[in-house]
């Protein structure tokens, strides 16, 4: 599996070196580009990274210590 870099250290799948250890990644559209929004617009293509959202995110039980 390819190494996926991620800096969201409060996710259960985050590991040292900012590596995502999830078995798979699901990303969806987020056309509001706002971290507080979960909704997306359908039928258009994202052109900037903030127009996507990692659906795989799962909050960790505790924040892991950064060990890059």
Image: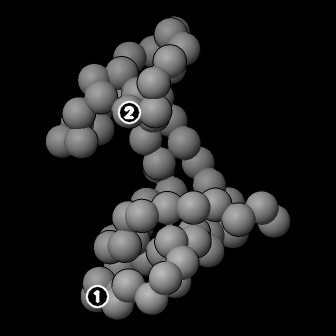
Q: Secondary structure at mark 2?
A: helix
- Circle 1 sits on which residue? 62
Q: Look at 50% across and 20% down and name the residue there.
A: 46
State whether residue 49 is above or below residue 7.
above
Q: Residue 35 versus residue 40: which sits nearer the camera?
A: 35
Q: Residue 6 versus residue 35: which sits nearer the camera?
A: 6
Q: Look at 50% across and 35% down and name the residue there.
A: 28
State whether residue 22 is above or below residue 32.
below
State whether residue 2 is above or below residue 40.
below
Colouring rule applied to residues = one colour
Residue 6: where, in percent of width, then height?
Answer: 49, 61
Q: Give the side of residue 2 with respect to residue 59, left or right.
A: right
The disc placed on residue 50 is: 2
Residue 3: where, in percent of width, then height?
Answer: 71, 65
Residue 68 visible to an observer of this rendering: yes
Q: Give the side of residue 32 with respect to residue 12, left or right.
A: left
């Amino acid at each position: 599996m390819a190494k996926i870099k991620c800096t969201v250290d409060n996710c259960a799948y985050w590991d040292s070196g900012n590596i995502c250890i999830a078995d798979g990644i699901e990303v969806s559209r987020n056309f509001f580009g706002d971290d507080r929004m979960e909704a997306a617009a359908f039928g258009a293509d994202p052109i900037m990274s903030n127009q996507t959202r990692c659906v795989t995110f799962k909050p960790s039980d505790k924040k892991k210590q950064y060990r890059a």
